[in-house]
Image (cartoon, helix red, strand yellow):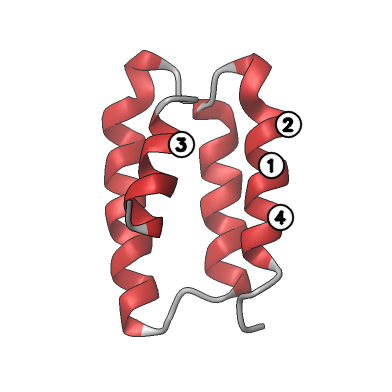
Amino acid sequence: MDPQKQFFTFLIDRTLPEMQDDVKAMLADAFKQQAAGTFDQTAFKDFAAKLAPKLLPDKVTEVQEAMAKFASGLKK
Protein backbone atom coordinates (compact mmCIF):
# COMPACT_ATOMS: atom_id res chain seq x y z
CA MET A 1 0.00 0.00 0.00
CA ASP A 2 1.33 3.46 -0.80
CA PRO A 3 2.43 5.46 2.28
CA GLN A 4 -0.14 8.23 1.81
CA LYS A 5 -2.98 5.73 1.49
CA GLN A 6 -1.69 3.89 4.55
CA PHE A 7 -1.50 7.13 6.58
CA PHE A 8 -4.95 8.17 5.31
CA THR A 9 -6.46 4.87 6.46
CA PHE A 10 -4.58 5.02 9.77
CA LEU A 11 -5.99 8.47 10.56
CA ILE A 12 -9.54 7.88 9.34
CA ASP A 13 -9.74 4.69 11.43
CA ARG A 14 -8.87 6.79 14.50
CA THR A 15 -11.15 9.74 13.77
CA LEU A 16 -14.53 10.44 15.35
CA PRO A 17 -17.17 9.25 12.84
CA GLU A 18 -18.80 12.67 12.60
CA MET A 19 -15.42 14.28 11.84
CA GLN A 20 -14.23 11.92 9.11
CA ASP A 21 -15.26 14.17 6.21
CA ASP A 22 -13.36 17.09 7.78
CA VAL A 23 -10.26 14.96 8.26
CA LYS A 24 -10.46 13.64 4.70
CA ALA A 25 -10.47 17.24 3.43
CA MET A 26 -7.57 18.15 5.73
CA LEU A 27 -5.57 15.18 4.47
CA ALA A 28 -6.26 16.02 0.84
CA ASP A 29 -4.93 19.53 1.43
CA ALA A 30 -1.89 18.26 3.35
CA PHE A 31 -1.06 15.77 0.59
CA LYS A 32 -1.28 18.57 -2.01
CA GLN A 33 1.07 20.71 0.07
CA GLN A 34 3.44 17.77 0.47
CA ALA A 35 3.47 17.17 -3.30
CA ALA A 36 4.21 20.86 -3.86
CA GLY A 37 7.02 20.79 -1.30
CA THR A 38 5.30 23.31 0.96
CA PHE A 39 4.31 21.00 3.82
CA ASP A 40 6.88 22.08 6.40
CA GLN A 41 7.05 22.06 10.22
CA THR A 42 4.70 25.05 10.44
CA ALA A 43 2.07 23.43 8.21
CA PHE A 44 2.47 20.18 10.15
CA LYS A 45 1.92 21.88 13.52
CA ASP A 46 -1.20 23.60 12.18
CA PHE A 47 -2.49 20.28 10.80
CA ALA A 48 -1.78 18.46 14.08
CA ALA A 49 -3.54 21.14 16.16
CA LYS A 50 -6.65 20.98 13.98
CA LEU A 51 -6.61 17.17 13.90
CA ALA A 52 -6.36 16.44 17.63
CA PRO A 53 -9.95 17.34 18.62
CA LYS A 54 -11.30 15.28 15.72
CA LEU A 55 -9.70 12.03 16.92
CA LEU A 56 -11.24 9.29 19.00
CA PRO A 57 -10.18 10.12 22.58
CA ASP A 58 -8.48 6.77 23.15
CA LYS A 59 -6.43 7.13 19.93
CA VAL A 60 -4.94 10.61 20.42
CA THR A 61 -1.64 9.40 21.93
CA GLU A 62 -1.18 6.73 19.27
CA VAL A 63 -1.72 9.25 16.48
CA GLN A 64 0.53 11.86 18.11
CA GLU A 65 3.35 9.30 18.38
CA ALA A 66 3.00 8.29 14.72
CA MET A 67 2.88 11.91 13.62
CA ALA A 68 5.98 12.78 15.66
CA LYS A 69 7.95 10.18 13.69
CA PHE A 70 6.71 11.71 10.43
CA ALA A 71 7.45 15.27 11.57
CA SER A 72 11.10 14.50 12.23
CA GLY A 73 11.63 14.20 8.47
CA LEU A 74 10.05 17.54 7.53
CA LYS A 75 12.00 20.64 6.60
CA LYS A 76 11.88 23.45 9.13
- The secondary element bearing badge 1 is classed as helix
Q: Earlier in the sequence, mark 3 or mark 2?
A: 3
Q: Nearer the viewer, residue 57 or 14?
A: 14
Q: Compared with residue 55, is residue 27 higher up or lower down, i.e. above or below? A: below
Label pair 2/1, CB-CB below 8 angstroms: yes
Q: Is residue 22 left or right of residue 74?
A: left
Label 3 and label 2: CA atoms lie apart by: 12 Å
Label pair 1/4, CB-CB below 8 angstroms: yes
Residue 46, numbered circle: none
Query: In the rendered image, which residue does mark 4 sit on?
Result: 68
Label 2 and label 1: CA atoms lie apart by: 5 Å
- The secondary element bearing badge 3 is classed as helix
Residue at figure coordinates x 64%, y 74% from the top left: 73
Q: Residues within 10 Å of mark 2 (few under 14, many from 20)?
A: few
Q: Residues within 10 Å of mark 3 (few under 14, many from 20)?
A: many
Residue 61, numbered circle: 2
Question: Type of residue at label 3?
Answer: Leu
Label 4 and label 2: CA atoms lie apart by: 10 Å
Q: Compared with residue 35, is residue 67 higher up or lower down, i.e. above or below? A: above
Q: Earlier in the sequence, mark 4 or mark 2?
A: 2
Question: Type of residue at label 4?
Answer: Ala
**In which image quadrant can residue 71 be found?**
bottom right
Query: In the rendered image, which residue does mark 3 sit on?
Result: 11
Query: In the rendered image, which residue does mark 1 sit on?
Result: 64
Question: Type of residue at label 2?
Answer: Thr
Q: Earlier in the sequence, mark 4 or mark 3?
A: 3
Label pair 3/2, CB-CB below 8 angstroms: no
